[in-house]
Image (cartoon, grey):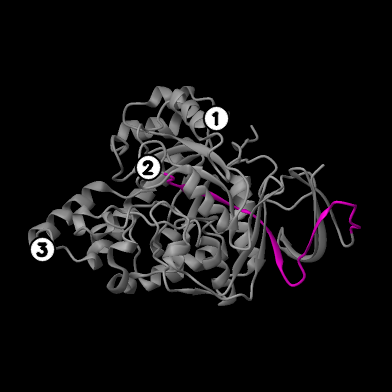
Amino acid sequence: MIRTLIKNAKIVNENIIIESDLLIVRNKIEQISTHISPQENDQVIDASGLYLLPGMIDDQVHFREPGMPHKGRFVTESAAAVAGGITSVMDMPNTSPLTITQQAIIDKHKLIEGHSHCNYGFYLGATNDNIEDIKTIDTSLICGIKVFMGASTGNMLVDNEETLDQIFKHAKTLVATHCEYSPMIDINESNAKEKYGEDVPLSLHPLIRSREACIKSTETAIKLATKHNAKLHVLHISTAEEVELFEKLPLEQKRITAEACVHFAWFDDRDYEKLAALIKCNPAIKQYSDKMAIIDGINFGNLDIIATDHAPHTWEEKQNKYFGVPSGLPLVQTALPSLLTLVNQNKFSIEKVVQKTAHNVADLFKVKKRGYIREGYYADLILVNMNKINKVYNEDMLYQCGWTPYEGIEFSAYIEKTWVNGELKWSENQLLGDANGISLDYNS
């Protein structure tokens, strides 16, 4: 029997911090108590001065499998995730082939089994043509339905108003939306190209992928969800105006929720001068005032979840001119260290970070026995040093793409250890064990 005893940890859970011991037996948390005596052959870890948190559940990643191995593979991106304290991920459907049918979901489960260091779930993608798949999907196979109400890879832009209405009417589970209004963006792109040709400055990205396009699309999604009483989750909010569209209520009182992403709480439009294409993403990183509004929205309850939208591209792809640069950032290895650094800067409390990266994600997506530090729950845990400086270097990233927009930045918090299903997966800067993460289960 595999037993791990963590002694003297500061356990952060359900809005309190307690100093306690925690016993892991096999893959579950067996006991939480102020004093647990070790048995012979227990692996004992002295966590004095360290914080024990539930692992982050990232509700939005693009791990690029199947179909884009030059950008990322589940085995590489999940390794980076556990190094960054992320123990479960929910992967997006804009792969090749697209994950837009039940059979494609089943095939993806088979493909990823044995190739992920963290646990995983998958979205069913919506298109203008697959409403029957949305109506008939076995919801136990998916974490939600993803609707790109803005430009996307392949045939995944849903721009037919009647189709959108039908999706919200017939969805049997949560609908997660990427909200940008494409006609506005198309006009802005055309105007920029007319003025600059191919040499559009990257600093114009937040004007091309404009705040107005985000606000209009988010308002549309909220209206449709309200009309059909659908469960709506709006991803990667990027403007102060959108933050105000969501109610300051506890998660359990909402049918309409919203997500913040880590890079929108760290970067703003002043960073384009230095980082340019490295922080080009959709929706775009916008003004300092938007960043501060997003931080406030996390703290005051407008925004319910913090995620990454991890979307790796190769270094070479990011060296192209504006229209040739793909949008997206690799983020899973730096997400929690950046958030915990913001805790040290008094932007958030550590309890708030745990609530938004673990508790609320598990509750919103009805993930079984994860997201909390509770007896009987899976031992998805991270041990954090809140007083350890670590500088970020590209060569330390485990991503397939091998780079990070945080290169050269010093974080003031550090992920010491990560357990996934009770197994130590990351310790002393080393990836441990096999890629044996499992598929997430959901409560009906």
Q: Are marks 3 and 2 in contact (CB under 8 Å)?
A: no
Q: Amino acid at mark 1?
A: Leu
Magenta span of residues: 36-63
Q: For this rendering, which residue is in front, 279 or 402? A: 402
Q: Is residue 217 magenta?
A: no
User: Residue 225's x, y, as percent?
Assistant: 45, 41
How far is mark 3 from mark 2, CA to CA? Answer: 33 Å
How many angstroms separate mark 1 from mark 2 (CA)? 24 Å
Above or below: residue 342 compared with residue 440: below
Is residue 225 something that shows in the picture? yes
Image quarter (top left, top right, bottom left or bottom right) of the N terminus: top right
Q: Secondary structure at mark 1?
A: helix
Quarter of the image where the C terminus is located: top right
Seen at 73% across and 43% down, the residue is 27
Amino acid at circle 2: Pro
Instruction: Please tell me the numbered disc located at residue 196.
Output: 3
Q: From mark 3 to mark 1, how far is it between C-alphas?
A: 47 Å
- The image shows residue 194, relative to residue 105, as above or below, that is below
Secondary element under disc 2, as helix, strand or loop, is: loop
Which tag, 1 or 2, sits closer to the chain's start?
2
Say what secondary structure mark 3 lies in.
helix
Q: Residues within 10 Å of mark 2 (few under 14, many from 20)?
A: some
Query: Which residue in the structure is indicated by mark 2?
Result: 69
Q: What's the residue type where badge 3 is placed? A: Tyr
Tell me the residue at 59%/58% (across/down): 430
Which of the pair 163/287 is nearer the observer? 287
Residue 346, position in %: x, y? 58, 76
Q: Which residue is mark 1?
A: 141
Q: Which mark is in front, 1 or 2?
A: 2
The residue nearer to you, when weighing 40 against 374, is: 40
